[in-house]
């Protein structure tokens, strides 16, 4: 029997991932990553040689970063395990942990404030409030639905995500701003940031709105995306507290290694630290 990936297979795998209690975002990413291999195969049988060639194609022709390729391969390997095609799995690349963050990746405090100002100036008050809520709490976009009228009143948000539960405190200033926002928009109960039908804000719509806002604020496009607000929260918190374990808990990370990636200094900051040592 030829090992060819079909759409019905992917649908069954999607149901399996749901039963495994994977988040919608995780399921979407896994299916998207597997479809990359599907496109590359072009109807050909899945063999170890084909997957190895796909791995090289991602690096040499598509020029993806090794970290991105590893992410794609993990999704593919898990699907191959699900299918029982164990001999088709390939190894990921070994990557040495970077000492400092790439230049121009992170959003600065000044750029963050410019985004908020631009949103208010354009009359996008909900977008301005969402940006400030994510950045001042460090929550994920998918966790915005946990910001409810009741949680704002209490000043504490109960979040359950990725099989973990944590409590997030709202800064007093943010709480007051949210109370005013709720009152002004006549939101009596339930989710604060939702569509007219009462559903939680769509991730893709928020992404597009922020990208458009970045142009208005004259900020490099690559820096403007919701998750970068979470990075800014992490770096700002760590500068004050210097407690990476506590920060990991606040962000809902299972591993401190994940948190390290959020607080890496830039090349310029690293260079300045070295120069200030004055050992030569």
Image (tube, rainbow, N blue to C red):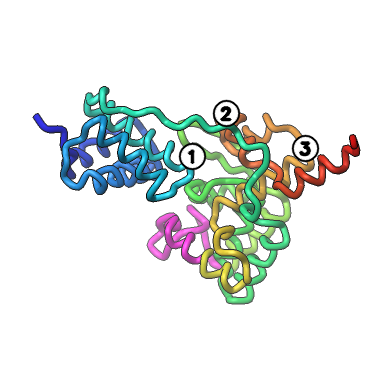
Q: Earlier in the sequence, mark 3 or mark 2?
A: 3
Local SS, label 3: helix
Please identify the quarter of the rendering in which residue 53 is found. Answer: top left
Q: Residue at x 69, y 57 (%)?
A: 108
CA neighbours of label 2 inside 10 A, class few (<14), some (14 to 19), many (20+): few
Residue 222 belongs to magenta span:
no
In the image: residue 106, left or right of residue 55: right
Nearest to the observer: residue 114 or residue 93: 93
Spatial CA span between label 3 and label 2 = 18 Å
Viewer-nearest of discs 3 and 1 = 1
Q: Secondary structure at mark 1?
A: helix
Q: Quadrant of the C terminus?
A: top right
Label 3 vs label 2, nearer the camera: 2
Say whether disc 1 or disc 2 marks the residue closer to the N-terminus. Answer: 1
- x then y, percent, for residue 174: 68, 55
Span shown in magenta: 185-209
Q: Is residue 23 left or right of residue 238?
A: left
Question: Which callout, 3 or 1, points at the residue further toward the start of the chain?
Answer: 1
Q: Residue at x 62, y 43 (%)?
A: 156
In this image, 18 relative to 46: left or right? Answer: right
Answer above or below: position of 258 versus 185.
above
Q: CA distance from mark 3 to mark 1?
A: 29 Å
Which residue was labeled with disc 2? 255
Q: Which residue is mark 3?
A: 241
Where disc 2 sits, the SS reads: loop
Q: Which residue is mark 1?
A: 67
Q: Is residue 181 visible?
A: yes
> What residue lies at 26% left-to-right and 23% top-to-bottom?
87
Q: Quadrant of residue 111?
A: bottom right
Relative to 247, residue 40 above or below? below
């Amino acid at each position: 029997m030829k090992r060819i990936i079909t759409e019905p297979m992917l649908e069954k795998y999607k149901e399996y991932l749901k039963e495994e209690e994977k988040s919608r975002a995780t399921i979407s990413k896994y299916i998207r990553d597997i479809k990359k291999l599907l496109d590359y195969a072009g109807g050909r049988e899945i063999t170890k040689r084909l997957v190895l060639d796909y791995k090289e194609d991602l690096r040499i022709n598509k020029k993806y970063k090794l970290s991105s390729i590893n992410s794609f391969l993990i999704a593919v390997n898990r699907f191959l395990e699900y299918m029982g095609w164990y001999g088709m799995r390939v190894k990921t690349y070994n990557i040495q942990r970077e000492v400092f963050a790439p230049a121009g990746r992170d959003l600065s405090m000044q750029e963050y404030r410019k985004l908020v100002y631009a949103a208010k100036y354009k009359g996008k008050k909900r977008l301005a409030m969402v940006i400030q809520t994510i950045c001042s709490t460090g929550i994920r976009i998918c966790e915005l639905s946990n910001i409810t009228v009741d949680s704002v009143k209490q000043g504490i948000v109960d979040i359950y995500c990725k099989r973990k539960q944590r409590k997030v405190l709202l800064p007093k200033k943010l709480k007051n701003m949210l109370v005013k926002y709720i009152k002004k928009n006549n939101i009596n109960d339930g989710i604060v940031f939702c569509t007219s039908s009462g559903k939680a804000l769509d991730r893709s719509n928020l992404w597009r709105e922020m990208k458009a806002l970045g142009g208005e604020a004259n900020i490099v496009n690559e820096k403007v995306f919701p998750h970068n607000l979470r990075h800014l929260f992490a770096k700002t918190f760590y500068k004050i507290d210097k407690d990476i374990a506590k920060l990991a808990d606040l962000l809902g990370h299972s591993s401190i290694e994940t948190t390290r990636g959020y607080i890496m200094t830039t090349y310029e900051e690293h260079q300045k630290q070295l120069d200030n040592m004055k050992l030569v």
